[in-house]
Image (cartoon, helix red, strand yellow):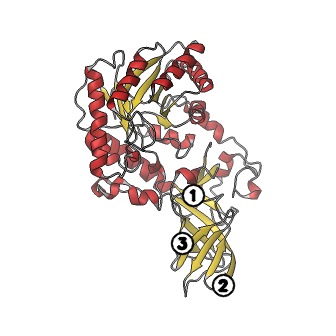
Amino acid sequence: MAADHPVTPAGLVELAGLADERVDHRFKALPPDADGLTVGALAAERRNLFTGGFTTPVLALSAESVEHNLALLETYAERHGLAFAPHGKTSMSPQLFADQLKRGAWGITAAVPHQARVYRAYGIRRIFLANELVDPVALRWLAGELVADPEFRFVCYVDSVRGVELMDEALRAASASRPVDVVVELGAGEGARTGARTEADCAAVADAVASTGTLRLVGVAGYEGEVPDASPERVRDWLHRLVALAADFDKAGRFAGADAVLVSAGGSAWFDTVAEVFAEIPELSVPVVKLLRSGAYVSHDDGHYRRLTPFNRVSEEGTLQPAFRLWAQVVSRPTAEQAFLNAGKRDAAYDLDLPEAQVIRSGRDGSVRAATGVTVTGLSDQHTWVRTEAGAELEVGDWVGMGLSHPCTSFDKWQLIPLVEADGTVTDYIRTFF
């Protein structure tokens, strides 16, 4: 964590209001007899996920795993001298944002204006928008936020001269009195997503920023996860380009007026390589904030990120724990080889991998066993297709606990997620705003 940029999660007082929200039909899977209770009152009852009246399907978030993952990335960032602005799009949960800020996060990353508005509603004082912002309505809102709160820090990408022109035009129309801090985005390569493709293009964007009175250049950034045919060597080469760009801009005096230079990268698949290369950033004319933006770590998963996590390469640094488990009930067993559960695409992430059957809880006596010989083969809107091998014990009424792949499309299907301890006790409810 960069010592020159201390974090204060001030303004997060609105979190208390989440506990006052009333439980009703809007929230999937919550006990019908809890209707009318506040979320705080329901949490205080410490009901059991399996015997406390919850209906299936129900998504549970492991309290122990979330705590473990929060602590691990805090320690990792500190060990490697990184500031941390985890991408909030993963969870869109102010409660988890507060936990991340308490764990030393510099701020929270956003992708679109709506997310930034949610962050501000819950008092986030540092927002890094990893996109170019050219919407005049959103820029007018931003100008107002910057005026209303002198402690609010906002940074966003710029990657085109036209984008700079549009930002400048909108901010001047809004009579913006504080400049908006921007970082030039270096594209990850031909055919990659966003970002200026060459160093010359980046310089042209920086020149365009310097010609405005509404924008201030404070750094460079990009997303190494978009490097074509990514490998440690290719990612490392691109990161060296990003670091060299920062050094060249500083030498040319492009960061005049900035009290620190932000150099930012780091999704959830290559943050070890980011840490390695960022450790080589040379001393610049002002302090450097090495800003990591990984977001999926908070829940991790049982698929995509289990395979891609950098901790597979640097296991001595620790191990993330998957925190999601989707519980669904067997509602049909038409043949010895087939069963159907009552969860589907409305409940489970399916864009990267299908859910993974992990455990079975007996509908007869509540005993739990491994889901041996049980495989998820497909999802309909409201059904999970399951193949069962010979000898697999599975009957109508059993609960099946499934691991999920891709946190970003798991959180977004649930507005209120039970936070569950290992024995099934629900200790809290995580509110999301998608």
Residue 355 lies in what quarter of the image? bottom right
Q: Which mark is residue 359?
A: 3
Gap in angstroms between the C-alphas marked 3 and 1: 18 Å
Local packing at callout 1 (Cα closer than 10 Å; few below 14, some 14-19, many 20+) is many
Question: Quick one: label 1 or label 2, which is nearer the N terminus?
Answer: 2
Residue picked out by circle 2: 335
Residue drawn at 35 percent across, 48 percent down:
270
**x, y percent for residue 413:** 63, 52
Q: Which mark is residue 349?
A: 1
Q: Amino acid at mark 3?
A: Val
Helix, strand or loop under label 1: loop
Helix, strand or loop under label 2: strand
**x, y percent for residue 369:** 53, 77
Q: Amino acid at mark 2?
A: Thr
240 or 319, nearer to the observer:
240
Asked if the residue under mark 2 is in contact with the one under mark 1, i.e. CB atoms within 8 Å, the reply is no
Image quadrant occupied by the N terminus: top left
Residue drawn at 40 percent across, 55 percent down:
320
Question: Quick one: label 3 or label 1, which is nearer the N terminus?
Answer: 1
Q: Amino acid at mark 1?
A: Ala
Local packing at callout 3 (Cα closer than 10 Å; few below 14, some 14-19, many 20+) is some
Residue drawn at 48 percent across, 26 percent down:
154
The tally of labels here is 3
